[in-house]
Amino acid sequence: MKPMPVIDPGTQPYWDALKDNRLTLKHCKACNTPHFYPRELCPLCYSDDLDWIDAAGGGVIYSYTVAHRAAGPAFAEDVPYTIAIIELDEGPRLMSRIVNPDAGLRIGVRVQVQFEAAAEGLVLPVFEIVTG
Ligand code: ZN
């Protein structure tokens, strides 16, 4: 069984939004900047005046690696898999998996979020290379 994320009151809205096929970011109202992962204080100005915004879900691959050796027994059936740092159009970067690496995997290529039911009650954001 794969490890599950630790969901606390501060990140519950993020996980709940994923179940509605929405990728959300914490947004600082003091300096008007979104960030990821969700935090209680803005990592840029330390304000606690934050709200949630919906990300459009588009971005580019900032970096990636292809795992040929599983990160543990729970991932053995998944190799090879592609892990990437996605730079969202809103600015923040997050780590995720590329679901169609054969479609032209390279740094800078456009990707779009997809929502994957990973386990009971858990939806994860994964990314698809935009083609055509
Ligand atoms: Zn701020």
Image (cartoon, helix red, strand yellow):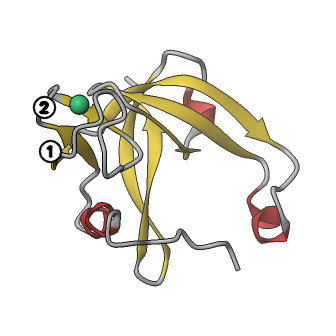
Disc 1 from disc 2: Cα separation: 6 Å
Checking the image for residue 49, the label placed there is 1
Badge 2: few (under 14), some or many (20 or more) residues near its Cα, within 10 Å? Answer: few
Q: Mark 2 CB in 8 Å range of ligand 1?
A: yes
Q: Dot 1: what SS?
A: loop
Q: Dot 2: what SS?
A: loop
Q: Mark 1 CB in 8 Å range of ligand 1?
A: yes
Query: In this figure, which residue is indicated by the disc labeled 2?
Result: 30
How many marks the image carries: the answer is 2
- Tell me which residue sits at (17%, 26%) in the image: 31
- Tell me which residue sits at (63%, 34%) in the image: 102
Give the quadrant of the N terminus.
Answer: bottom right
Q: Is residue 54 left or right of residue 124?
A: left
The image quarter containing residue 7 is bottom left
* Residue occupying the far left of the picture: 29
Checking the image for residue 124, the label placed there is none
Cβ atoms at labels 1 and 2 below 8 Å apart: yes
